[in-house]
Image: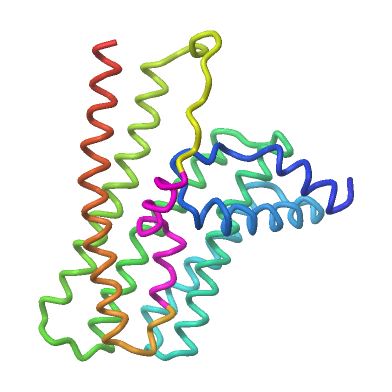
Amino acid sequence: MGSTGTVLRELRGAQKSAKGVSLYSRYVNRPAGRVLAAWAYRMGLTPNQVTSISALFTYGSLAAVALVEPSWPLGAAVWAGLAIGFAFDSADGQLARLTGRGGPDGEWLDHVVDCGKMILVHTAVLISFYRFAELPSQGWLLLPLAFQFAAVLTFCAGLLREQLGKTAVSGPGPAGAVAAPVSRVRALALLPADYGVFCLVFALLGAPGAFRAGYAVLAVVHTLFLAAFLAKWFRELRALRAG
């Protein structure tokens, strides 16, 4: 088993494409995941075990949102737990590519954990609103439900786009084809839709009004991204049929 430095160098060569990835995931979450993947490799952990660690940090943090009265210490702890869980979510795939131990079971487990996270994060906010918040009106209880709808639909539609695209296109691309360069402008524009950026709003749990305002703004942004993504993915799939 090589040194940590050797493992990190090998992991740098086992990265996914940066296309369609926000600046946070590219420059913060993936590098953090690379360090965690190197640690997991040195510890002899499997990719599925790393996925389970990610779930423990994420689900534990969200349970705290639902069960503990909001405060600044809670907000800091929840943000840290979600950020660490997200980094481990990146680490499992990197470890799988490094060791060649990935497979359908690991991909399935990763998607199940991610889907559970999308559902639980907004359920936890709804429970916290109901139990602890002095809401201006009961209509605020609908906000987490609407945000959950947008998040889950984006997640499921994106997976379907990926899988249907693979089914429609088989075999290598055209000879001599060159991958399009990664757009830094696009990576910047995707920041508001990045889960890692979303997690930052929980640091505001100690200021209920600021948390609600930040959460509402992100809900609107994610809804707008959902509409844009659905239109884009539909056009892409229709073009595949026409081709």
Residue 50 horizontal side relative to residue 232, left or right: right
Q: Quadrant of the N terminus?
A: top right
At 23% from the left edge and 39% from the top edge, which residue is drawn?
230
At 84% from the left edge and 52% from the top edge, which residue is drawn?
5
Q: Quadrant of the C terminus?
A: top left
Whether 60 is drawn above or below 114: the answer is below
The quarter holding residue 97 reads top right
Q: Is residue 236 magenta?
A: no
- The image shows a total of numbered marks equal to 0
At 38% from the left edge and 88% from the top edge, which residue is drawn?
70
Residue 38 horizontal side relative to residue 33, left or right: right
Q: Is residue 186 magenta?
A: yes
Which of the pair 131/92 is nearer the observer? 92
Residue 34 horizontal side relative to residue 87, left or right: right
Residue 53 coordinates in the image, percent (x, y): 61, 61
Whether 34 is drawn above or below 196: the answer is above
Range shown magenta: 184-202
Residue 214 coordinates in the image, percent (x, y): 30, 74
Whether 41 is drawn above or below 207: the answer is above
Residue 106 coordinates in the image, percent (x, y): 57, 41
- Report the predominant secondary structure element of the magenta stretch: helix
Whether 134 is drawn above or below 61: the answer is below
At 37% from the left edge and 24% from the top edge, which residue is drawn?
165
Which of the pair 165/52 is nearer the observer? 165
Color style of the picture: rainbow
